Amino acid sequence: ARRYQGQGLPLTDLVQEGMLGLIRAVEKFDWRKGFRFSTYATLWIRQAIQRGLENTSRTIRLPVHVAQRSRKVGRIERELATKLGHEPSDEEIALMAELPLEEVIEIRKAERAVVSLDKPVGEDGDTSLGDLITLETPSVEEEVHEAMTSQTLLSAIADLPESERNVIEMRFGAGDQEPQTLSQAGKRLGLSTERARQLEQQALTRLSRRPELQAMREAA
């Protein structure tokens, strides 16, 4: 998350947004399709951080119909990534979204203005985010490890106190629900936005301290 600093959110918030993206990826990932979890998760993490930056730093709100189409393009991009195992092209998204190609290009260009796959990462700057998204065929050991990793995180979420679990599930979108903002989650739970934020922070802190999740991070 450090590479996104200086774009409108403090590091702690960037880490939380990325964690929410990771949780969402785990909930949606199907290891039986043969794709690398790291490939799938990176797309979700990137989009979660982009959305957090956008919600914080955008001073001019998009018209409702434009925002709706932007969300539609984002949803279809994730669906195609799941099916294809790679980041879909503008043409593939436009065809599935039934939108003009030029409009899809402009929408994706605006989203990528936040962070590009070509942006250098690492201390030497010789590696891009795109370079980190490999499409190698996973071994049996990798498939089993990634499936266990997904189940470990879901089990950890299930063990959270109910109030914290409810906020986390709404934030990353349990089942087929759309991810909720802190304000939306708070309203649905009868809580203030600040209280929802506190519960989210408590949940993420609790998850980060789980021994099995610490072991996963060390092994990564």
Image (tube, helix red, strand yellow):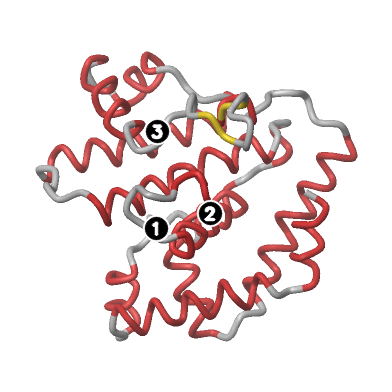
Query: Which residue shows up at 26% across the image and 37% down it?
Result: 70
User: Element under label 3?
Assistant: helix
Callout 2–callout 1 Cβ contact below 8 Å: yes
Q: Residue at x 36, y 54 (%)?
A: 52
Q: Position of residue 59 (x, y in %)?
A: 15, 50
Q: Which mark is residue 76?
A: 3
Q: Is residue 98 left or right of residue 161?
A: left
The reply to whether dot 3 and dot 2 touch (C-beta < 8 Å) is no
- Residue 115, percent across and down? 41, 36
Q: Nearer the viewer, mark 3 or mark 2?
A: 2
Residue 172 position within the rendered picture, expressed as x and y whole percent measured from the top left: 47, 60
Graded by Cα atoms within 10 Å as few (under 14), some (14 to 19) or many (20 or more), the crowding at tag 2 reads: many
Give the spatial CA distance, label 3 vs label 2. Answer: 15 Å
Seen from the viewer's position, the closer of residues 122 and 166 is 122
Residue at image location 36% in from the left, 31% down from the top:
112
Give the tally of numbered discs. 3
The three-letter amino acid code for the residue at tag 2 is Arg
Real-space Cα separation, disc 2 to disc 1, in angstroms: 9 Å
- Mark closer to the chain start, 2 or 1: 2
At label 1, which amino acid type do we have? Pro
Q: CA distance from mark 3 to mark 1?
A: 15 Å
The residue under label 1 is 179
Picture coordinates of residue 188, whole percent (x, y): 31, 77
Query: Mark 2 sits on what residue?
Result: 24
Which residue appears farthest toward the right when viewing the image? 141
Using residue 213 as the reference point, say whether residue 94 is left or right of it: left
Question: Horizontal placement of 117 versus 183: left or right?
Answer: right
Dot placed on the residue nearer the N-terminal end, 3 or 1: 3
Tag 1 secondary structure: loop
Q: Residue furthest front?
A: 124
| SS for callout 2 | helix
Q: Is residue 85 visible?
A: no
